[in-house]
Amino acid sequence: MKTDTNIQFIKGVGERRAKLLGKLGIRDAGDLLRFFPRDYEDFSAVVPIREAPEDKDVCIRATVLAQPQANATKAGITIYKTEVSDGDSRMQVTIFNSKYAAAKLVPGRKLLFYGKIKRNFICTEMSSPQMEEAGSGERIRPVYPLTLGLTSRIIEKIVANVFELCAEDLKDTLPEAVRAYYGLLPTREALRLMHFPGDMEQLAQARRTLVFEELLTLQLGLLMRRGVNRIKAGCVLTRDCSAEFIASLPFTLTGAQSRAVKEACADMAKKWPMNRLLQGDVGSGKTAVAAALMYSAVKNGFQCALMAPTEILAQQHSNTLKTLFENTGTDIRLLTGSVPAAEKKKIKAAAASGEAQLLVGTHALLEKDVEFAKLGLVVTDEQHRFGVAQRGALSAKGENPHILVMSATPIPRTLAMIIYGDLDISILDELPPGRQKIKTYTVDSSKRQRAYRYIADHLDNGRQGYIVCPLVEEGENELAAAETFAESLANGFFRQYRVGLLHGRLRPSQKEAVMRDFAVGKVQLLVSTTVIEVGVDVPNAVIMLIENAERFGLSQLHQLRGRIGRGEHQSTCILVSDAENEQARRRLRKMAETADGFEIADEDLKLRGPGQFFGKRQHGLPELKIADFYADMAVLKTTAKAAKHLYASDAGLEKPENAGLRRAVAELFRSAGAQDF
């Protein structure tokens, strides 16, 4: 039988179970083999009753001493109790409402009891244990993710059937030489031991093999995708004019900025288009780097386009660039949805003729009638806010232009190359001199009124501030919750101040209007949901209070905090939390201790795991079945080197020994909707 056999036709499945397995993403036999257990129950490590630790799953081998006694409670639950003995000590076994389980407790029968024990002055007890026949059940049992109607034991039996039927169709993924060099198992053996390990050492070896396979496959696929996308650039720079631009600036670039400019200019002089991510913390100077590249492109006779996700951000970029390009004679135009029709027509004509050298805008840049005479460089800000198709649509307006994508979202240094595998990357890990660190404090709700008074003091001194709404509970109406919260502040403690409200349900034009009022000082205190995470610079906003701070990820808290601290005044961020959970407290302490976004991102990934940090689909990458970007960091680094070596010797994985890897790359990336393979 083949691994692509429909799961319905596997022994023990049928139509009803096939539908249930489909809910778990299992469509065929191959899917089931890579549907890995979420945990294991070790029935092989038998311990005596006397030595068994409390509150930890243990396996006891004991003989049933008496027929269980059944007692019905007022709530209608039947409780079965009996005693068992391991020859040295006795243990009471309690079963709740399961006649089927109680029927196993036959006097004189030797069973394995798996569960947690509790001790009191009277007895040692195990409630609702799992039970297996002694003599045949002493092994490690897999525990699978479930859906209603399926048990772990049912899935275990079906997996065993699949191995029996599909064993011959399980081909190795890795070349034999790679397996031997890294001490890895054949794919078939690794899969079998992941489901049915003989001991924990075998399980560790199987997992290491499959993690290695998955991460190597991922990285080879990214290298191959980058190779496929390498087409001839339509705008090769013959002169690097960035030094001339940098010399004209009224400030000195940081070492990181200078390095990023150098890396990008070197890219733009090559025969294929630059495809580079510029990643830097809030305030690290990404715009100045982009400006140096745009200046060089313009001096080489090319046009540039910068796309931002909102009008107010586009306006901000336009103003910044006009300041940076002052006295250079560069023609800079701003194209957004709110530009009057007559003005739009002029701007589009100037872009089409080449008169407009630098066009800044929003999605308006993607309109069909926006044409460029010679588009050489496309820059997108906060690139995660644009789809790949939108970025591609702007690039398509030129002849294979260079691409720079900018992001202030911190991603751990060690992972950035993986997450943005089809991009080269420059990291701005230094802040310009003179920037003051934002003071960050954690307080509980008993100090809220005191915090409000502190905010009011700043507003009285002519400054502005933010209060971030508490996160809504599941099922709660976000709009109603935000409006109620803002109303309670505007009519309560802050009734003497001009309070504005910003939330995700506002239309884009309404959001722009609120932010514009805040930027010009019409609004003193902005009550907001997390939509301000990426927003406009308001140098006069110097204080922020975040409610329910423990419910945000560290990276999100850092992004929110980045809205303040952008001017000459000392800024303060107050995190309000009543969390008693130690992990939550640790996260908030980290926020108070450091302002380094990359350090915070590392901690966030460590504490929350990749699932929550990256979201379900890890920034658009294929979904990983077994590897964990953080826990498997050592393997990640090893496979990065191995992938480069394999790609250098066989870029298309055409050699016979690489057929398994070629197949695995195609399967992994097809699952993510990629058409490249």
Image (spheres, grey):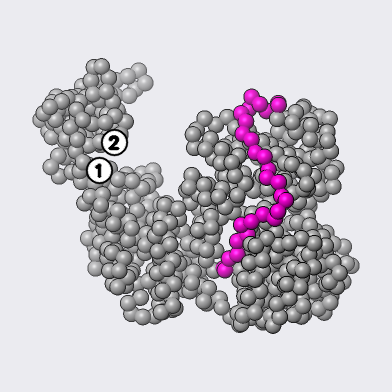
Q: Please indicate, yes or no, whether residue 100 appears anywhere in the rendered image.
A: no
User: Distance of mark 2 from mark 1, alpha carbons?
Assistant: 9 Å
Viewer-nearest residue: 425 or 31: 425
Q: Is residue 2 magenta?
A: no
What label sits on residue 604 in the rendered view?
none
Q: Residue at x 56, y 78 (%)?
A: 230
Viewer-nearest residue: 611 or 593: 593
Residue 55 image point, x, y percent: 32, 31
**Number of labelled discs?**
2
Left or right of 149 on screen, residue 569: right
Q: Is residue 427 magenta?
A: yes
Residue 84 image point, x, y percent: 16, 27
Position of 333 relative to 437 (above/below): below
The part of the chain drawn in magenta is 423-450
Query: The disc labelled 1 sits on which kind of residue?
Result: Asp
Residue 253 image point, x, y percent: 71, 62
Position of 407 relative to 448 (above/below): below
Viewer-nearest residue: 571 or 548: 571
Query: The disc labelled 2 sits on which kind of residue?
Result: Asp
**SS label for mark 2:** loop
As drawn, the residue found furthest toward the right would be 342
The answer to whether mark 2 and mark 1 are in CB contact below 8 A is yes
Left or right of 83 on screen, residue 152: right
Task: Name the residue that disc number 1 marks.
Answer: 42
Task: Name the residue that disc number 2 marks.
Answer: 57
Q: Please indicate, yes or no, whether residue 441 appears anywhere in the rendered image.
A: yes
